[in-house]
Image: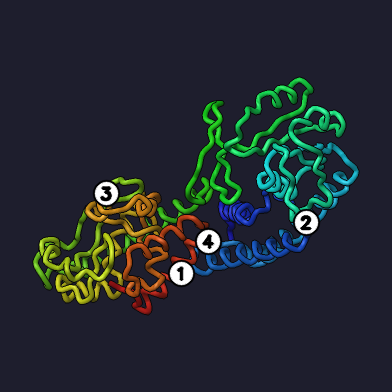
Amino acid sequence: MRVRRFHYFFIFFLNNTILAYLGFYSDRRENSFWPILLRLIKASVILFTVISTGLFFLRNFTIPKPYLPIFVGMLLLFVMLDKALMLGITGILARQGFHQRRILIVGSEERMWRVVEALQQQQSWGHQIVGLLMDSDQKMSSNSRDSSFIPILGTISDLREVILDKQVDDVIFAVLPDRPRSLRPFLEICERIGVSVSIVPSMFDPEEASLKVEVLQGVPLLCRYHFNMDASGLFYKRLLDIFVGGLGSLFCFGVLVPILGLAIKLDSPGPILFRQKRVGMHGRVFYIYKLRSMYADAVVQKAGLLARNEIQGPMFKIADDPRITRVGRFLRKTSLDEFPQFWNVFKGEMSLVGTRPPTPEEVAQYEDWHRRRISIKPGITGLWQISGRNKIKDFNEVVKLDLQYIDGWHLQDDLKILWRTFWVVIARKGAC
């Protein structure tokens, strides 16, 4: 059997992607080998499952049968050896003081301890925290963490003497945002002596991790993100949208529309597809597409049904909506009316998973905190849809679920939501 080289390249690419996703290329230091081993086993299981699924469903995807178990076995062996050697070597060099950086931290208690925790988790050839300097004469609280082995060496006024006495290589300033005095005199002391300086930005909040540093053509920028979506995660999310959106669009317009379109036309007069303005990410307006499940004058009838709205807030929903046609009830029960939205996903106006796109009239009634739900691309499905949407009667609860999704986003969450959506649709739960 002739094996295509592309298949091997695909396996290597998939392998590196999974390892990167599970943190194997991170600079975070592991205190034990067991978490690494568990993640490696997880990576091997994912790789084996994905490739086995591809071999089962894709006839053109062919590799020799012994190749996959041999590849996974070698992956386990050599990555474990690599990680064990690196952990051992870096540990020995760190204990011997090889290229060890002696670090002094200056600032307020809470912010200094946040830096200490970060340094303890940071993988490096070796660094030692020589001590802490308080930014004022305020005493360290009695329950301070790790105070037994990280000494308090004084206050910021002792900076020069401590640097010289402790042979400091780096100084990290972690002072409060509302510090009344300028740091410039102390920065000049470090510059004259030749000590490297790092400053924790005043915008940094130890309780949040939304502050990022970027460089724009040499200009440093502090960026405050409100959701946890990095570039690589968005890239793979978009790849998934293009692939599934393309397949869904072909199935919708090549199979469903010709068959269901006739039933829609025979059931009631009007177009096959329903097109409506919706609000997408950060207020971008686009047209959403659905298979028409209501009578053609449904928008006109809505004004007379507002008093029956079952959801508190700027969202309209009623049980036994009289505007829904007979065919429309079947389409909604099976969620087939949503299939044209795969075209919106393919075009990039929507995503497979996100928050449901509101109408401009609904957005006009939003409070400021409601608008965070449209700070990402809207989706065909989302956390609200799989959380019993028929049971939620308060729009604020809908927004809370949306913000829970946004603030804790990870790519695997999208995969879980898609999986749960499949079973919700099969069981016909929560249908409009």
The tag earlier along the polypeptide, 1 or 4, is: 4
Q: List the residue tagged with mark 2.
A: 31
Distance of label 4 from label 3 (alpha carbons): 28 Å
Between label 2 and label 4, give the one nearer the viewer. 2
Q: Residues within 10 Å of mark 1 (few under 14, many from 20)?
A: few
Distance of label 3 from label 1 (alpha carbons): 27 Å
Three-letter code for the amino acid on which mark 1 is drawn: Trp
Q: List the residue tagged with mark 4.
A: 412
User: From what the image shows, is residue 118 above or below residue 420?
Assistant: above
Q: Which type of secondary structure does the marked residue at label 2 adopt?
A: loop
Q: Which label belongs to residue 8?
A: none
Identity of the residue drawn at 55% across and 39% down? 203
Q: Quadrant of the C terminus?
A: bottom left
Distance of label 2 from label 1 (alpha carbons): 35 Å
Three-letter code for the amino acid on which mark 4 is drawn: Gln
Q: Which label belongs to residue 419?
A: 1
Q: Residue 161: horizontal and vertical position, in percent?
A: 83, 29
Q: Quadrant of residue 274?
A: bottom left
Distance of label 3 from label 2 (alpha carbons): 50 Å
Q: List the residue tagged with mark 3.
A: 286
Side (left or right) of 386 relative to 136: left
Identity of the residue drawn at 57% across and 36% down? 178
The tag earlier along the polypeptide, 2 or 1, is: 2
